[in-house]
Amino acid sequence: MTSHVKLRRDRIGLIDYETQIKEMRCQLVDQLKVFDLQLEQKSQQLQDLMDYVRRRGEIESEYARSLEKLADRFTSRIKRKEPSSNTVAQVWVALLSQTRQESGDHSRLSETCSNTLIQPLTQCLEYTQRLAKKSKDICMQLQDGLLKVTIEMQTAWRTYYQYHSDYVCADGKLKEAEKQEEKQKQSAAKKLERLIEKRQEKVKETYLKSSKARNEYLLKLGASNATMKNFYLQDISTLIDCADVGYHLSLGQVMQAYLSSHWRTQQNLGTGLQQLQGTVSGLAQCRDRDTLLQEHFNTFCMPLCFPYQPHDGDQVSEVNFECELSCELETRFKQIQTRLKAVSMETEERVKEYVVGRSLVSKLQARHDQLKAAVEKGITSSLYIRKNYSTSSIKHNHKLFYGDLLSFIQASGQQIPVVVQSCVCFINLNGLHHEGIFRVPGSQMEINNLRDAFERGEDPLSERPYDLDSVAGVLKLYFRTLEKPLFPSESNSQLLEHAQIKGETERAAQLKITISSYPGPVVIVMRYLFAFLHHVSQYSDENMMQPYNLAVCFGPSLVRAAQNDDDAVTLQPLINALVKNIIVQQENIFPSQSELQGPVYEECMTLEQPLGLMIYFSLVHVLFNYVLAELETTHPTNSSSSSSSTANAEKKTEGSRVNVGCSVIQSKSAAAPKGGSTAAGGKFMLQFPPSHQYIPRRVHNPGNMGRE
């Protein structure tokens, strides 16, 4: 019954997001229609005004010629008569003079309408159409960015639900095992202890994945809401202003010139001209913009902010700043802060770059503020535990580099070669936000050392940190040096032909058919690699690596043109476009895990690596000091000796504590009451006080030191 309720609740949350995004899509389409309608109205207004001015010039010219003819006719009559000094003659002279003056004024008005006013109106129409097109392009780009961050938020939300469900399931199994342990007799206690330890590890791993997925969901949720607010509250007004730049000014200048000509020729029409003057003087760009927004209120009103929808039982609503995630969050915070400053300076250059950049700034600012709040709550150094993927125990005679991928997989039993899995995992944890990843070359000496270590069957990335660009260079080097490229050369022409299909759905379907014909182990590696590259491209606003940039880096290595092919240079752009399409549509091209069993790339990864002797002995000293302090509390008579021993021990372990640089790891054997107790066999059992809320973690001690 509970599972049905959870499923129904999850389904309701999913429908709410999909409905809200669908409504927003419809709204964005209506916005483009309104912009097109505004352009059509302004173009029609300018065209009508030009027709009016042109026809008015013709009428004024005809009227001026008629007045000139009329004045000449009556002037010739007066000249035939004797000059008269009476008032009637003076009236005739004044009237004819005024008629000639009026004819000249109308002739100048005709010239103004036909020549002076037509040219600025034509230029205004051209500029208006050009600016409207650019504003629409910018609007479409901003809308695509808004939909992109919204879809990323929805994807992160689904990932978070999935991992948190796994965590809830693992936690339930752990509680069930603990209940079962209480019911079982003493004889089966050891077996249940191993089961509980295994499930505790599972709970810990799923909890970290869930926390990381929730962090990503919250960051993308904040970025989506910030982008949406910036788009509706600032970008829309800016785009309307950009589309109207010069429109009102040009129209006002034309009408001012028209009014000036009329004021010189028709002073008796002062009342009507004053009304027209008031109308022309009332031209206001901001008022027109506000009127447009008010008339289309439903189209431009900002939707409701996306609410945070936690999974069942999850009470955390902020970015989780735990010791396992603190280093990553702090590094990401500094990278985003640096990137935010750079983008803020670049967006002040031009109008288009300013509008697009401001949208990026708002998204980065939202992530920056969330990470800053999390970092300020407590900065603690963390220790990433990473699995050692050493394959020294696997015996095979196939080379890793400069070898055949399929033969190596069959001989070694590694479905994903260790170099691919180790480099991808390292970059997932440390390099998704690194600017220029895969584009900036690393140290050639370090790349060679890593290559030799992987070739010997070791995993050097589990021993110490390396330069990110060098790790990325090793991953590119592996695929570049394969004896046969990842995509078989005989299928290049078919792949390039499919890549030119315009329809995305049909293109993905044809590519999937071709790739499905490859050997299964090779398809698994392809699926793993392209899922990772797609994940890297989702952080392009920070690492500057869009899908096409990644395709330029990996295209020549994955899809190789024939060496004797004269069109290799011409085919390279087509190969890059092919790899880019596969990165973008990788979910639709490669088979799912249910269709093809094998490892898949996980966006939220956790690493485990063995702790060194220094960390182990430092942990022993810390536990020893804690035991002495608890014994001093339990046996006050020996307080003086205990305190002196504690002081000496603290002095001895001070240096080692500084060198550890990580959080204290609690031993799973600490199950005794506070202060410790002596269990069977004389072994002392420890337990940290309740205030130390550390996550249980198994300590892998070199040389089985933990058993002694």
Image (spheres, rainbow, N blue to C red):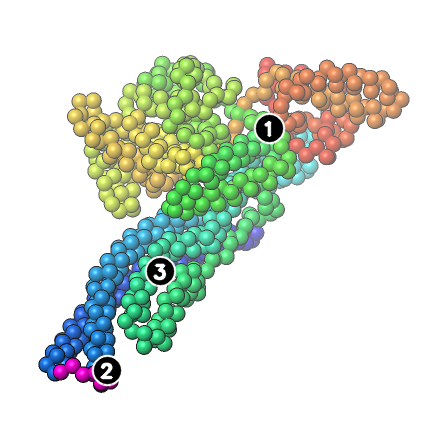
Q: In the rendered structure, which disc, 2 or 3, sits on the residue that comes first in sequence? A: 2
Closer-to-camera residue (258/578): 258
Range shown magenta: 82-91
Instruction: Measuring from the top left, give residue 421's x and y in whole percent.
Output: 43, 26
- Which residue shows up at 83% across the image and 26% down it? 633
Tell which residue pokes out farthest to the left in this image. 80
- Give amino acid for label 2: Val
Q: Is residue 235 left or right of residue 7?
A: left
- Residue for badge 2: 91
In the image: residue 304, left or right of residue 31? right
User: Residue 656: horizontal and vertical position, in percent?
Assistant: 67, 17
Judge whether residue 294 can be spotted in this image.
yes
Callout 2–callout 1 Cβ contact below 8 Å: no
* Mark 3 closeness class: few <14, some 14–19, many ≥20 residues within 10 Å: some
Q: Residue at x 42, y 49 (%)?
A: 146
> Circle 3 sits in a helix, a strand or a loop, which is it?
helix
Real-space CA distance between mark 2 and mark 1, rounded to the nearest whole angstrom: 105 Å
Q: Amino acid at mark 1?
A: Ser
Q: Looking at the rendering, in which quadrant would you find the C terminus?
A: top right
Residue at the disc numbered 3: 248
Q: Residue at x 41, y 37 (%)?
A: 540
